[in-house]
Amino acid sequence: MPGVPGALGTAGAARARIVLMESSRRNKINCFQCVHFAITWETKFPRCCRLFGFKTAKMPSVSVLESSGEPCAGFERKAPARQDKRRGWEA
């Protein structure tokens, strides 16, 4: 759509996808280490973000990056597991 302000066209969309993929590699967020990540029983949408309240087939951080173009702002790292000498590892 040349001439239309704000329209990317196919070449612009391809460039935007490449930039999005490169930024996702640099800002990789591991949802398994986030306190807001959850697993659901739904086979079509097995992953969930409790903070933003959505279920997805992909990792929630990837869905956030694709929809907003920004890495997930709600990521909070889980507390590390600790070891009790009498009982072993605790989650």
Image (cartoon, rainbow, N blue to C red):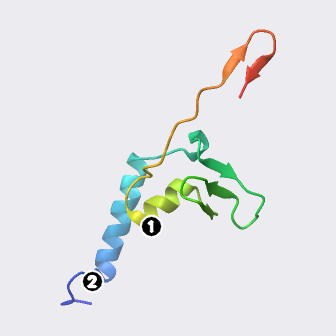
Examine the image and state in which quarter residue 84 appears: top right
Image coordinates for residue 77, horizontal then vertical, percent: 53, 36
Q: Which of the labelled discs sits on residue 7, or is there none? A: 2
Left or right, 17 with reference to 63: left
Disc 1 marks which residue? 67
Q: What residue is rendered at 67% in x and 50% in y?
A: 38
Task: Please tell me in which quadrant of the rendered image residue 53 appears.
Answer: bottom right
Q: Indicate the quadrant containing the C terminus: top left, top right, bottom left or bottom right.
A: top right
Q: Which residue sits at x=38%, y=67%?
A: 17
Image height of 88 relative to 73, above or below: above
Q: Position of residue 68 (x, y in %)?
A: 40, 64
Q: Is residue 7 above or below residue 29?
A: below
In front here: 17 or 59? 59
**Residues marked 2 and 1 touching at CB (< 8 Å):** no
Graded by Cα atoms within 10 Å as few (under 14), some (14 to 19) or many (20 or more), the crowding at tag 2 reads few
Circle 1 packing at 10 Å, graded few (<14), some (14-19), many (20+), is: few
* Label 1 residue SS: helix
Residue lying at 80% horizontally and 10% vertically, measured from the top left: 86
Kindly identify the amino acid type of the residue bearing the numbered disc 2: Ala
Q: State the residue in front, 49 or 25.
A: 49
| Foreground: disc 2 or disc 1 | 1
- Left or right: residue 84 compared with residue 7: right
Q: How many marks?
A: 2
> Horizontal and vertical percent for residue 7?
27, 83
The N terminus appears in which quarter of the rendering? bottom left
Per the image, label 2 sits on a secondary structure element best described as loop
- How far across and down, in percent of the image, does residue 49 sit? 59, 54
